[in-house]
Structure formats: structure tokens, C-alpha cells
Amino acid sequence: MQRTGLLIILSSPSGAGKSTLARRLMAWDPTMKFSVSATTRPPRPGEVDGREYFFRSREEFLAMVRAGEMLEHAEVFGNLYGTPKAPVEEAMREGRDTLFDIDWQGGQQIRNSVLGKNVVSIFILPPSIAELERRLRTRGQDPEEVIQARMAKSEAEISHWAEYDYVLINDDLDRTEDDLKTIIRAERMRRERLPGLSEFVRSLNKEFESR
């Protein structure tokens, strides 16, 4: 039965496993669409417009905001970032889910948008702060000052856990992945996400009438 696509928001402090879980979800369901953000920052070597980001000038970006074409947007380190509404609406009509890897502020804006009733928000917690720091260090990607900045930001991010529909503690990656899939399967079957269900029930009632 055709259904309305979900807007699946994944948020977590850096190092809690959100990006790995997002990749696993995309591999599990290739029809799922990963939300591509728009940004005013210049493309880096190898980046392609429409793949990593929609690269826009500041004037173009602000025009999209004024026209109501952004689900959410924010300024980060002098550059604007945001989620264009049109690709998300198209995926919803096609019954495809859109996956958002965004922070609590972006998630809040999307929940408060015109598409908010289709949002499923999930916050990923680390099993401990010590483990969170260990994961950041073992990645070997960031200098010490960046690790400390991420740890400082984590406290503020975790404080918003209660704003989410679901909260998972990622102490075992495989189990957390299974829990995510269970949530998505159940949310896909909610009555309000199956617009053809009423017509199906009417057809059953007609069968009763014809007996």
C-alpha cells in the first residue's frame, strides 16, 4: 500500500555513531534519500553541486529563505546552511523516506515546519562521556583543540535529548542499528501515513453489503 514518506531526523553529539548508523540505514534501504543541504561556502576539491551540497551564493540562499523554500537554515562560521524543501516534498509524495543528519536546532525547525507531522526524530546517546571522548580520539582525524571543542559542544547537544521522539543509547552498534530499523518499520505503518487505507476499508465494507 502506498504510504507517505518519512522525514527521519538523526541527531547526536559528535562521536556517538550517528554518521555510521546513517550509512547503515542507507545500505539497508537504498530507496531512502539522504537530505542534501544547500550552503554558501565554496565547494572543496572533488565536491559536486547537488551531491555533497547545493552550492549557492549568499544572495541566492537568502532569496530561497524569503520564498519559503527552506525547511531549516542556520549560519555556521560565517556560512549559511539549510535544507531545500522541494526535494523532500518530492520524496514524500513518492513514498520515500528522507534521512537528515542534523543537529537539534535544525531538527527543531523541521519539526515546526509545514512537514512536521511526517517527522520521526531520533537522538543517539553515547554509553558514557568517557567513551564518547575515546571514540573521538581513536578516529585520529582531529587535533586536540578540535576534540576539546567537540566535547564542550556535546554537553549542550545532549541537553536537548528530551525533545526527540526516540532516544537510543549506542553501546552496541549492531543492536542500535536493529532498534533504528524497528522504529522506522513501525512508523511507516502508522495509520495516518497510509492514505489509501480508508479506501481499502471502504472496499471491505462494500463486500459486506454485497453478501
Image (cartoon, rainbow, N blue to C red):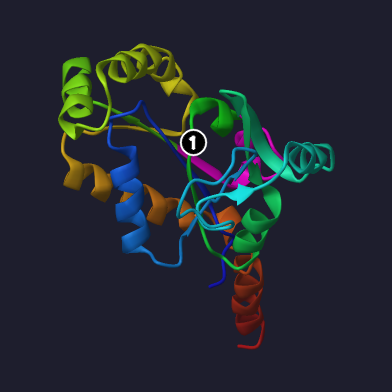
Residue 97 rendering spot, x and y as whole percentages:
51, 57
Q: Is residue 199 above or below residue 91?
A: below
Residue 83 rendering spot, x and y as whole percentages:
62, 43
Q: Give the left or right position of residue 147, taking residue 114 as reference.
A: left
Residue 203 rendering spot, x and y as whole percentages:
63, 79
Residue 129 rendering spot, x and y as whole percentages:
22, 16
What's the residue at 50%, 52% (across, down)?
52
Tell me the element at label 1: loop
Give the number of callouts. 1
Identity of the residue furthest to the front in this view: 45
Verify whether residue 71 appears in magenta: no
Label 1 belongs to which residue?
102
Q: Quadrant of the C terminus?
A: bottom right
What's the residue at 67%, 48% (across, down)?
84
What's the residue at 46%, 61% (across, down)?
32
Relative depth, front residue between 35 and 145: 145
Residue 127 visible somewhere in the drawing: no
Q: Give the range drawn in magenta.
A: 109-121
Q: Is residue 186 above or below residue 95?
A: above
Residue 133 visible somewhere in the drawing: yes
Which kind of residue does numbered mark 1 sit on?
Ile
